[in-house]
Image: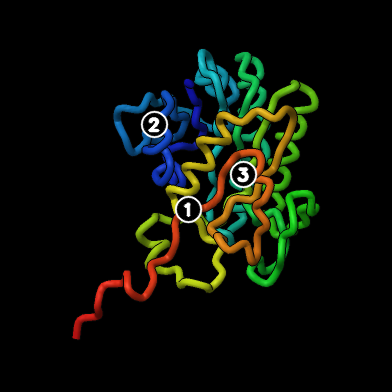
């Protein structure tokens, strides 16, 4: 498929797009070029509908993974997150719809839920998002933009509620066997995106995607049932770790 990746030059894009490019033709829409020069690049801002519309022409699927500023203490960060996570999602979906794209994947976040995620248990995706911090609030508003696209334009949209995408080697180094984690290895995130690009259940669907392979915090039964996905990476056992040098 030809996939329009909005925001593909950021951190998550650098983790997952190399694997996605092995299966699909990518066109990356971003303010700066992607990490790999062989991917088609369309320069533009998520606030520029006409640029989004041009980038969507001839594509089969929309993958929205743009990110706002993470300097959360500043008013500018609040503004950019509303721009990227709400306005940008709506404009990208509208551009996709006008270009006859009927399927989209949105990289949402488990931050749509309030409080410390590590102290809670999430039984399924029907638990109502309740985040009040502006980042989680804007991510759940982004999901509302996706629901709207499904209802008004009859699009199928899969929202993946991601948890701390992390390079595989760092995930292995920082994860301890039998200690719950929600951080997700980059390869597992990429696999989730691949199947979400293919799965078209009709309407809006949300999926919890995390590295909690023992499912002590996240019940990811829906992802396994509908996407045939579960996290595969495991932390090294004591025998797998290199010996300490003195």
In this view, the mark in front (1 or 3)? 1
Would you say residue 144 is visible in this rendering? yes
Measured in 3D between alpha carbons, the distance from the residue under mark 2 to the one under mark 1, in whole angstroms, is 20 Å
Residue placed under numbered mark 1 in the picture: 232
Q: Position of residue 244 (x, y in %)?
A: 25, 80
The tag earlier along the polypeptide, 3 or 2, is 2
Q: Residue at x 75, y 22 (%)?
A: 154
Q: Is residue 126 above or below residue 36?
A: below
Other residues around mark 3 within 10 Å, as few (<14) / some (14–19) / many (≥20): many
Which callout, 2 or 1, points to the residue nearer the camera? 1
Residue 238, position as x, y percentages in the image: 36, 75
Report the residue at 56% width, 27% height from top: 62
Residue labelled with disc 3: 160
Q: Earlier in the sequence, mark 2 or mark 1?
A: 2
Closer to the camera in the image, 72 or 124: 124
Does residue 218 sit above or below 144 in this rendering?
below
Give the crowd class for mark 2: few <14, some 14-19, many >=20 residues within 10 Å.
some
For mark 2, give the secondary structure.
helix
The tag earlier along the polypeptide, 1 or 3, is 3
- Judging by the rendered image, the residue that carries numbered circle 2 is 21
């Amino acid at each position: 498929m030809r996939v329009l990746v909005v925001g593909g030059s950021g951190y998550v894009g650098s983790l997952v797009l190399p694997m996605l490019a092995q299966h699909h033709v990518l066109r990356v829409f971003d303010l700066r070029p992607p990490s790999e020069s062989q991917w088609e690049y369309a320069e533009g801002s998520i606030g520029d509908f006409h640029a989004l519309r041009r980038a969507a022409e001839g594509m089969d699927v929309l993958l929205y993974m743009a990110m706002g500023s993470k300097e959360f203490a500043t008013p500018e960060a609040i503004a950019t997150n509303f721009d990227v996570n709400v306005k940008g999602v709506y404009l990208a979906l509208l551009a996709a719809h006008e270009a006859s794209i009927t399927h989209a994947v949105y990289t949402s976040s488990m931050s749509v839920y309030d409080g410390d995620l590590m102290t809670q248990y999430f039984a399924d995706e029907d638990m109502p998002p309740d985040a009040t911090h502006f980042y989680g609030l804007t991510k759940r508003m982004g999901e509302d933009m996706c629901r709207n696209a499904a209802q008004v334009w009859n699009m199928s949209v899969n929202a993946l509620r991601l948890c701390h995408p992390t390079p595989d080697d760092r995930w292995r180094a920082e994860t301890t066997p039998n200690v719950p984690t929600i951080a997700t290895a980059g390869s597992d995130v990429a696999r989730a995106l691949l199947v979400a690009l293919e799965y078209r259940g009709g309407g809006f669907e949300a999926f919890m995607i995390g590295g909690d392979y023992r499912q002590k915090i996240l019940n990811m039964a829906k992802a396994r049932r509908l996407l045939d996905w579960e996290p595969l990476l495991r932390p090294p056992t004591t025998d797998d770790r290199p010996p300490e040098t003195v």
